[in-house]
Amino acid sequence: MRSTAENPTAQNPTAEDPTAGGTVVQEAVAPAPAYAGSALDLRDVRLSYGPVEVVRGVTFSVPAGSTTCVIGPSGSGKSTLLRGINRLHEPSGGDVLLAGTSTRGQHPDRLRRRIGMVFQHFNLFPDHTALENVALAPRTVAGVPRAEALRRAHARLAEVGLAERTDHRPRDLSGGQQQRVAIARALAMDPEVMLFDEVTSALDPELVKGVLNLMATLGRQGMTMVVVTHEMGFARRVADQVVFMDEGRVVEAGPPAQLFEQPRSERLRRFLAEVL
Ligand SMILES: Nc1ncnc2c1ncn2[C@@H]1O[C@H](COP(=O)(O)OP(=O)(O)O)[C@@H](O)[C@H]1O
Ligand SMILES: [Mg+2]
């Protein structure tokens, strides 16, 4: 039997308050790999549901190796925008440049290997172990041979602090651990960009911080990330750029200090007054 020593983050309630000040609790992650993130440029991106345009001309740039947090009220188009970036939803206009090149002509399957996405609900296969969940996409989507896919899956799970949990099934993992498996699964495709859509919203409060710290670590290791989040403390601390969206448009974008300390628009001031 393998050791089932508990994950320290699930045991230490003092380490879990996502609003607690600047101290970053280091996860038991493996030595830093250097991710080779690529720049992402959104140019007048538009997305519609039927006749209703819900993302109405979004333009911003995410330099390689930087983190952009997207904030804004519910219904402002944040999820739809992320789904447009990796073409789970086909944009009705505009362009997304990856590493400086238009992705418009690129097949969505190919694009999704380059742009990983993590959702609020982890959608792991319940009958697969953590290792199998992580190894699956490289094997079936990218055609990586089984042994290499398993080797990669081990490495990715170690990077997210789950080296001891590779043989666990989702039901035997906490929500935070399941979400970290989902992050490892996205990383296993060696993406150039990672998109996160409110990945801590469904977690018990005491499990939020471990996932946020993992994301902060990925950012420091050079991953290019777009993070839709309600965690204003995370956005303030980790983002290189914060984008505030309302009604399908970017209302303000800039460094976190500027948006949080000196919001220019009444809409952002009102939003911050509600969430902070
Ligand atoms: N599948 C859908 N069909 C029709 N309208 C949708 C669908 N999904 C989202 N919407 C609408 O699109 C708008 C943007 O939604 P969404 O991107 O989920 O916003 P956010 O993630 O910021 O909460 C909302 O008005 C929402 O009601
Ligand atoms: Mg959403």
Image (tube, grey):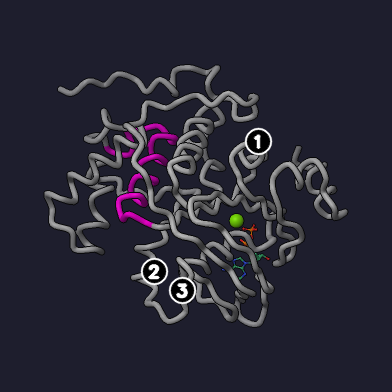
Q: Residues within 10 Å of mark 2 (few under 14, many from 20)?
A: some
Q: Which residue is mark 1?
A: 233
Q: Hey, what amino acid is under mark 2? A: Leu
Q: Hey, what amino acid is under mark 1? A: Gly
* Magenta residue span: 169-191
Compared across the picture, whether 271 is left or right of 102 comes to right
**Marked residue nearer the N-terminal end (2 or 3):** 3
**Marked residue nearer the N-terminal end (2 or 1):** 2
Q: Hey, which quadrant is residue 18 in on the image?
A: top right
| Helix, strand or loop: magenta stretch | helix
Q: Which residue is mark 3?
A: 101
Q: Residue furthest right?
A: 266
* Residue 179 is one of the magenta-drawn residues: yes
Image disc number at residue 111: 2
Closer to the observer: label 2 or label 3? 3
Q: Residues within 10 Å of mark 3 (few under 14, many from 20)?
A: few
Compared across the picture, whether 56 is left or right of 6 comes to right
Q: Is residue 195 above or below residue 99?
A: above
Q: Is residue 194 above or below residue 49?
A: above
Q: Is residue 90 above or below residue 157?
A: below
**Please, what secondary structure does the residue beneath circle 1 have?**
helix
Q: Determine contact: label 2, label 3, CB under 8 Å.
A: no
**Please, what secondary structure does the residue beneath circle 3 have?**
strand
Q: Residue at x 48, y 36 (%)?
A: 211
Q: Rounded to the nearest whole Å, what is the CA distance between mark 1 and mark 3? A: 33 Å
Q: Quadrant of the C terminus?
A: top right
Q: Rounded to the nearest whole Å, what is the CA distance between mark 2 and mark 1? A: 31 Å
Q: Hey, which quadrant is residue 56 in on the image?
A: bottom right
